[in-house]
Image: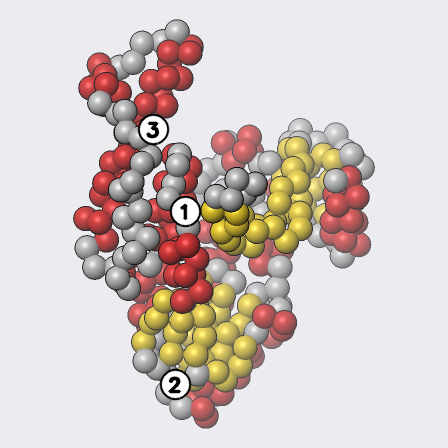
Amino acid sequence: MQEVVRGEFLKLLQVGIIYPISNSLWVSPTQVVPKKSGITVIQNEKGEEVSTCLTSGWRVCIDYRRLNSVTRKDHFPLPFMDQVLERVSGHPFYCFLDGYLRYFQIEIDLEDQEKTTFTCPFGTFAYRRMPFGLCNAPATFQRCMLSIFSDMVEHIMEVFMDDITVYGGSYKECLLHLEAVLQRCIEKDLVLNWEKCHFMVQQIIVLGHIISKNGIEVDKAKVELIVKLPPPTNVKGIRQFLGHAGFYKRFIKDFSKISKPLCELLESLKNEVKGKTRENRGEKPRPSEIRTIQFSGAKFAPPYPLCAKLPL
């Protein structure tokens, strides 16, 4: 793990994103977590199908929870995904642009850089550019992107964080829109990741949905994966299943009614866990929870795969 940390911070040090610092009053710890790239279904040693997260390496991140707890929150809203998809869909040509290194493109004010100080086995460092983990990073980045493209959004393009979608009613029009967006990127020093950019295509995946002139479609690969998910056997499994199925709820008729039993079961199990935790601590359950705990003896036996066979 130390080699992972060393390699990551050495790269940031070489390009000037971080710098050594001493005697800082703000020091946060470093964590190394698996870099998740989705989920899949595999068989365990008992031959049972279980869901597991795919990992594509390790991610070095800073635990800024203490800093975030004393940070004044920025409530700048992120765009509603459904509204973005509606505005983008229905065009014959698209270009997709991806911002390079996302948050690192935004500089931190000199007097605030010390607050990003972190410690690792090789010393203490601070960021010159906005790192992941800060509670206001998403809002700050989205505000910055909208300020750059304020006169273009909802007219020739849409932007959701570092995902930029340019569209046009014809090949020539889309090309002109792309030229305008790229020129703005040059003017504002916005760097793009060319490996993830797609130009002049008629179908594209935006925010997990397939977009084309025909409208909005689900990504069939994601649907097949959801269908293959085994029935959940614990609170975490129910949350995961509802999260994946709920991502496409706009395509599922009466989704709220269909998922209601699972939602109620989840709430029941959460209250049961709270009750057991209090018992272990020697605490008494609250009066309002006694009835819930008393009647929450649900077992994960069929029938519970409610959403696995939903008509799409």
For the point 23% across and 53% down, the residue is 255
Q: CA distance from mark 1 to mark 2?
A: 38 Å
Which residue bears the numbered disc 3?
Answer: 270
Which residue bears the numbered disc 1?
Answer: 230
Where the C terminus falls, by quadrant? Answer: bottom left
Q: How many marks?
A: 3
Q: Which residue occupies the extreme bottom position in the image? A: 172
For the point 62% across and 42% down, the residue is 33
Q: Earlier in the sequence, mark 1 or mark 2?
A: 2
Mark 1 packing: few (<14 Cα in 10 Å), some, or many (20+)?
some
Q: Which residue occupies the extreme top position in the image? A: 282
For the point 49% across and 87% down, the residue is 175
Image position, residue 252 (x, y; %): 25, 59
Q: Earlier in the sequence, mark 1 or mark 3?
A: 1
Q: Earlier in the sequence, mark 2 or mark 3?
A: 2
Image position, residue 53 (x, y; %): 54, 48
Image position, residue 239 (x, y; %): 38, 41
Q: CA distance from mark 2 to mark 3?
A: 47 Å
Labelled disc at residue 92: 2
Depth order, front residue of 269/119? 269
